[in-house]
Each structure stands twice: as structure tokens, then as C-alpha cells.
Image: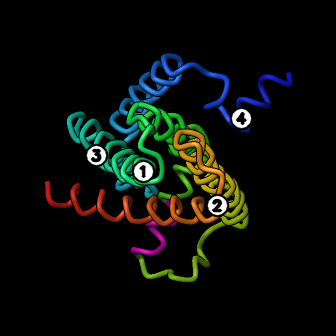
Amino acid sequence: MKKISKIFINPFEDLSVQMQSAFGLIFFILAVLISYLGGIEFFGILKIIPNANIQFSEAIYTLLIDIFVLALFLFAYAYLENKKTRFIDCLNVVLLSSVVMYFVAALTLISPIDEILKRIMLAIESGDMKLDTLMPFDLTMITFFGIISLVLLVYFFYLIIVGIKLAMNGKKVYQGFIIFGLIILADTISKLIIQAI
């Protein structure tokens, strides 16, 4: 039990590079399937769009862009801090941390959230900006889902910061803030690249 909790706190310490790559690749393939079959677009690193009409090739290249843009930004910074930093370590951090975002996307498919989101979109399209036409249960569920999503988003940032600091052997607090800023910047660049394609 202690080992499992340790994996959630810092999966990068105990898993070998090969295991990290294998798990990252497996979850990447699952994310492509979730995106394509579930109609979910990963638009940038931090944005998930449900009910999207997405082609299989789009699902692959949007996720690849998200992964590699973030990995390159983080590697560039980590390499500036420590020339011994390896790209594979940064890539594995991004691949494993992204599992959290894939989980959020999967939650929209396996819960009533998908239907509630559709009802919210219909209400907004019909002019109900205050969402008065929605049932209290719908509002409660969407609030609950929002809280869970926010907690998972914080966990996503935490994993990346912990993982990159480990990859570059960083010990300083300011490095976490720089990594946080790089994630936001990489998200913006990723969205611009996806829009341009």
C-alpha cells in the first residue's frame, strides 16, 4: 500500500525509464482512442473539448503536438539548469503527467457529465445564460465535476513540477514557478500550432 501511494506522490522515482516510457505510450494510445471514439478534443495541453467531431488523424496529431511542445519547452529549461538533463526523462514526465488530463476526459464519457454538458450547451444556445432551465441535480453534478477537475488539474501541475525538478536535479523553489509558467506558455503555443494546421 505504501508503494502505491508513493507512486501517486512521485511516480518518477521508483519506475525505471523503460517502465515510464511503456506506461506513457500505453496511456497515449488510450488517449487517442478516448479522443476519437469519445469525440473529445485535446485542444492544447490544458483544454478538453467534449462533443467534438474529431477524426482519428486529428486525435493523434493534436496529442502529439501537445506532448512534444510541452516536453521541448521543459527540456530546454531543464537543460539550461543542468546540462546532464536527458530529453527522454522530460518526455516521460509529460507522458505520465498527461494521464491525469486523459482521466478527466474519460470522466466526461463514463459519467452523466456528457449529457449534462449537452443540456447546458442547448440551454445556452436557446438563450438561457443563467441556466434556469436546468435541474438542480445537473448543476450539482457539474459543480462536483468542476471541483474534481480542478483538483486533478492541480495534481497535473504538481506531477510535472516534481518530475522535471527530479529530471534536472533541481532543488530550488523558484524552479517550480518557472516550470508552471512554461506549462502555460507551451499550452498557448500548442493551441496556436493546432489552429494553424
Whole-Å distance between the Cαs marked 2 and 1? 28 Å
Which of discs 2 and 1 lies nearer the camera? The answer is 1
Q: Please give the label number shown on residue 74.
A: 1
What residue is shown with label 2? 146
Which of 184/27 is in front?
184
What residue is shown with label 4? 8
Which of discs 4 and 2 lies nearer the camera? The answer is 4
Whole-Å distance between the Cαs marked 4 and 1? 21 Å
Main secondary-structure element of the magenta-colored stretch: helix
The quarter of the image holding the N terminus is top right
Which of discs 4 and 1 lies nearer the camera? The answer is 1
Residue at 36%, 51% in the rendered image:
76
Secondary structure of the residue carrying numbered label 3: helix
Q: Is residue 109 visible?
A: no
Secondary structure of the residue carrying numbered label 2: helix
From this view, report whether residue 183 is shown above or below residue 17. Answer: below
Tell me the kind of residue under disc 4.
Phe
From this view, report whether residue 76 is shown above or below residue 178. Answer: above
Residue at 57%, 60% in the rendered image:
175
For residue 124: magenta? yes
Q: Please give the label number shown on residue 65.
A: 3
Which residues are the magenta region?
A: 119-125
Which of discs 2 and 3 lies nearer the camera? The answer is 3
Q: Give whichever of discs 4 and 3 has the lower sequence position.
A: 4
**Residue 182 lies in what quarter of the image?**
bottom left
Whole-Å distance between the Cαs marked 1 and 3? 14 Å
Residue neighbourhood size for the residue with mark 4, other residues' Cα within 10 Å, grouped as few (<14), some (14–19), many (≥20): few
